[in-house]
Amino acid sequence: ATAMSSALNHVTVTNTTATGNGVVIDGGAGGSGTFTANVQNLNVNVKANGFVAQNGVTLTAGGTNTITSATGVGLKLNNMVISGTGANFQSVDVTAGTTNGVVMTDVTGGQVAITGTGTTANSGGALTTVGHAIVLSNVVNVDRNNVHVVNARGAGSQGLNIDHTAADANAMDVTIENLTLDAANNNGIDVLAANSHAFNLRLNNSTLTDNVVMSNTGS
């Protein structure tokens, strides 16, 4: 495959059409990791999906990246790699999501983080969704700081759905700091992990109005 790269710095993206996405970086079906992207100081405010990187992309993100989606997925990372310098997003907001709010699946490499501002509550963004507010599945290193789950309101929806059961899963390290979780139709935080996989979860300084359920596959 031909190597490709892209760089976005101090870019503002707005799209008010119902199906209008913000930024989509896609290595294509069967992506081989030959697409590198560097995103700095991005401001996205759209109706549909805010920021998507998938299919073999290697992503670096820094500076002040803020993502707002009205009805789509705010931040979606799938089948891709985070560079050694990491990928940081200051805030991700979903105001009336019709699906999941933040989705990360099969993400390897460095750390991906929603940081917020210092220790300021809710500065990492607010999520109101029909689906799960946050989905994490087989993500090597992820931090969630100062995030506000307003309501994951659909039937069976959870504030955080964390799954580490894939047969080929890498070690997974999750830190959740200063989370405010107001409402979820199902569990506030639901964690399912396989006994055979290395898995660390830290939940610190957080306020939850719904329960936390942790279970394993017994494998």
Image (cartoon, grey):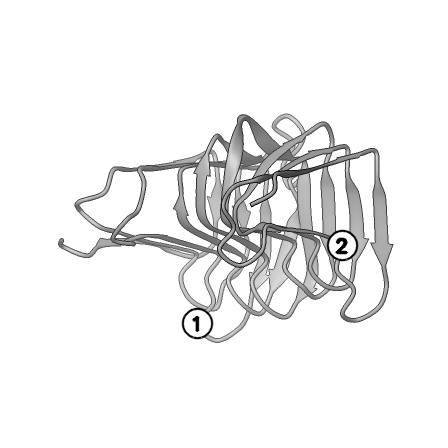
* Closer to us: 149 or 49: 49
Q: Residue at x 13, y 54 (%)?
A: 218
* Closer to us: 184 or 104: 104
Q: Position of residue 113 (x, y in %)?
A: 55, 35
Crowdedness near tag 2: few (<14), some (14–19) or many (≥20) residues, C-alpha within 10 Å: many
Q: Is residue 115 visible?
A: no
Question: Image height check: is 184 above or below 160?
Answer: below
**Does residue 216 appear left or right of residue 178 in this picture?**
left
Q: Which residue is mark 2?
A: 22
Q: Which residue is mark 1?
A: 156
What residue occupies the far front of the structure in this picture? Answer: 1
The kind of secondary structure element at disc 1 is loop
Question: Image height check: is 175 above or below 74?
Answer: above
Q: Quadrant of residue 72?
A: bottom right
Q: Position of residue 102 (x, y in %)?
A: 57, 53
Q: Amino acid at mark 2?
A: Gly
